[in-house]
Image: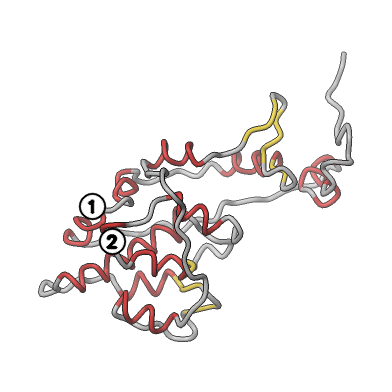
Amino acid sequence: MEHIGLGLINPSFLNLQKDHVSTNIWNDGEVTFRARYNFWQQLPSAPVLEVIRKTTFGHILDIGTIEINNHLITILVERWRSETHTFHLLVGECTVTLEDVAYQLGFPINGAPVIGITSGNWEIICHNLLGAIPTDKQIMGQRIQMSWLDSTFVVLSEEADDVVIEQHTRAFILRMIGGFLMPDISGSRVHLMYLPLLEDLFNSIGVSILWNMSCGDH
């Protein structure tokens, strides 16, 4: 009976194998992995939801609670190769494409990519677009704590005008990006480079923009 041999047939191409998680597994090591995610605990008020549904992020509101299968993700991690940015399976190689994202989340992906700033005076930007300024402890590098977004924008005043409603909308969309679309390794912060792209909510960005801006960051 033939058995599938452990290790690479030709190690010259996948040259990061010695540091790959699969090497530890093949040597009878254990790998403990849990996906990091930070979904929002509750939906915003009706006026904010109405604005979000008019943007390209409205489809995400219909997804609902997602059960994370840590066993499946662990297996995919074992099969992921950073040299090729593909999953190496017995049937061949595969990867997640932008088209896959569009089918799953309903985002538009056509058109030219949009780029923006990745650093700036975040206090001023937050003041202009969110109407609130986080403290130095709440901004870590270029990222803001999502707990600050949760606590600061939890209640929308009944007297809120369109400007305030849009500020709460930007805050919740940032929460959607950091907790679901583009979570970073912390699982608790979101990069502020997305905020200036939300200035015009009704010409809002789609995944094609997020994807292009995040390729070098995640």
Amino acid beneath label 2 = Leu
Query: x, y percentage for residue 15?
Result: 85, 46
Query: x, y percentage for residue 21?
Result: 76, 47
**Residue at (31% x, 79% y) in the render:** 128
**Residue at (21% x, 58% y) in the render:** 51
Q: Which residue is mark 1?
A: 54
Count up the numbered dots.
2
Q: Is residue 198 left or right of residue 18?
A: left
Q: Considering only vertical position in the picture, is 44 above or below 63?
A: below
Of the 4 image quadrants, the one containing the N terminus is top right
Q: Which residue is mark 2?
A: 201
Q: Considering only vertical position in the picture, is 90 above or below 185?
A: above
Q: Earlier in the sequence, mark 1 or mark 2?
A: 1
> Mark 1 touching mark 2, by CB under 8 A?
yes
Q: Considering only vertical position in the picture, is 97 above or below 152?
A: above
Specify few, some or many for label 1: CA neighbours under 10 Å numbering under 14, 14-19, or 20 or more.
some
* Residue found at the far top of this picture: 1
Query: x, y percentage for residue 172?
Result: 33, 63
Of the 4 image quadrants, the one containing the C terminus is bottom right
**Residue at (43% x, 65% y) in the render:** 194
**Cα distance in 3D space between marks 1 and 2:** 8 Å
Q: Quadrant of residue 74?
A: top right
Amino acid beneath label 1 = Lys
Q: Is residue 130 left or right of residue 82?
A: left
**Residue at (86% x, 35% y) in the render:** 8
